[in-house]
Amino acid sequence: MTSPDRSRLTLFVGILGVSAVALYGVSEITALSPIALAPAYMFSPMLAGLVICLRRDIPLSAVGLRTGRWRWLAVAAVVALPLVGLTLLIAVAVPGVGFDPAANPTPGLALPSGVLGVIATFGLVLGLGATVNAVFAFGEEFGWRGYLLWELAPLGFWKASVAIGALWGIWHAPVIVAGYNYPSFPAIGVVAMIIACISFSPVYTYLVIRSESVLAAALLHGVFNGSAGLVIAYAVSDEAVLSELVASPVGAAGVLAFGLAAVGIALIGAPSLTREFAHDTGNSASIHNK
C-alpha cells in the first residue's frame, strides 16, 4: 500500500488553518462569538476534503460517500446512546458529582413524566441526532472519516485513528478557547478536547470500516451531540473542574466510556484498514490488529 501523500495532507491542513483564521475574522467583523459561528465552521473539514478529492481526481465513493451497509449504519445511529449512558454512570460515580432526577434535558419542551418521558427523550434524541444533527456532523466527518481516513489508511487502524483524533481535537481549538465545552478552562480545554477526540476516534473508525460508508460517522456524531446533553443535565456539581473536565461527555467520563469501547475493539480484533474500506471487496470482514 502506498504511503500517505504529504502534499495532499499539507493542503488539507492548510485549508483547515485558513478556515480557522476566517472564523475569527468573521467573528471580529460581525461581533459574533466564534461559538455562534461554529455551525458554519463545522463544514470546513468537508470543504478541505472536497477540494482535495476534486483537484486530485479521488472518487468520492472511494472516501466513503456511499450508502454502504445498512445494518452497520443502524448500529452507528444507536450506539451513541449506550455510550452516553455509560458516560453518565461514570460521571455520577465521581465523588462530588450528584444525579439530579428532576432535571429537564429538553428545556422548553414538555414531555411525559416517568418511563414514557424517558422513552420520549431518547426517541427525540435519536430522531434529531440522526437527521438534523447528522447533516452538520457530516460537514466534519467527510473530512475526518472520509478523505483523511482514506489518506491515512496505510498507517493502519490504530495509528490512523489516533492521528485523525489528534487533528480533530486541534481543529476544535478556536471555539474551545472562546469558551465552548470548557468555559472555565479555555486553555486546558484544548488539551482535554484533543484527548477526548483521540479516545472517540477508534469507535468512529470501526463503524466506518464496518459500514463501508462515512455516513456511519455522521450518524454516530449527530446522535452523540444530541444525547450528550443528558449527561450535562443529570450529572451535576458545584465545582467547575468536575462539571466541565470530569463529569462531562467530553471530559474524563466520556474519555473513559469511549476508551472502554476501544479496549473492546482491541479485544475482538480491529478490522483491517486499507484504502478500499469503502468498497465491498471483503477487506472489511477480515480481522487483525494493526
Image (cartoon, helix red, strand yellow):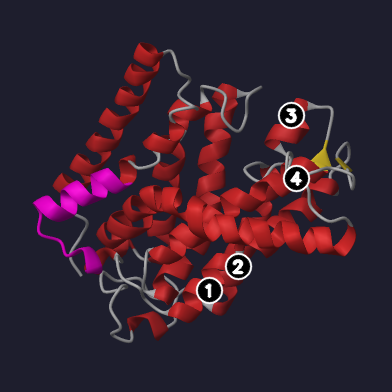
Q: Nearer the viewer, residue 216 or 164?
A: 216
Snapshot quadrant of residue 94:
top right
What is the C-alpha distance between the residues marked 1 and 3? 35 Å
What is the C-alpha distance between the residues marked 3 and 2? 30 Å
Q: Nearer the viewer, mark 4 or mark 2?
A: 4
Q: Position of residue 112 (x, y in %)?
A: 83, 56
Q: Nearer the viewer, residue 127 or 202?
A: 127
Residue that label 1 marks: 74
Q: Tag 4: Cα neighbours inside 10 Å, few (<14), some, or many (≥20)?
A: some
Q: Does the magenta run of residues contain 175?
A: no
Q: Secondary structure at mark 1?
A: helix
Q: Nearer the viewer, mark 1 or mark 3?
A: 1
Disc 4, disc 2: CB below 8 Å?
no
Snapshot quadrant of residue 236:
top right
**Amino acid type of the residue that numbered disc 2 sits on in the rendered structure:** Val
Q: Nearer the viewer, mark 3 or mark 2?
A: 2
Q: Tag 2: Cα neighbours inside 10 Å, few (<14), some, or many (≥20)?
A: some
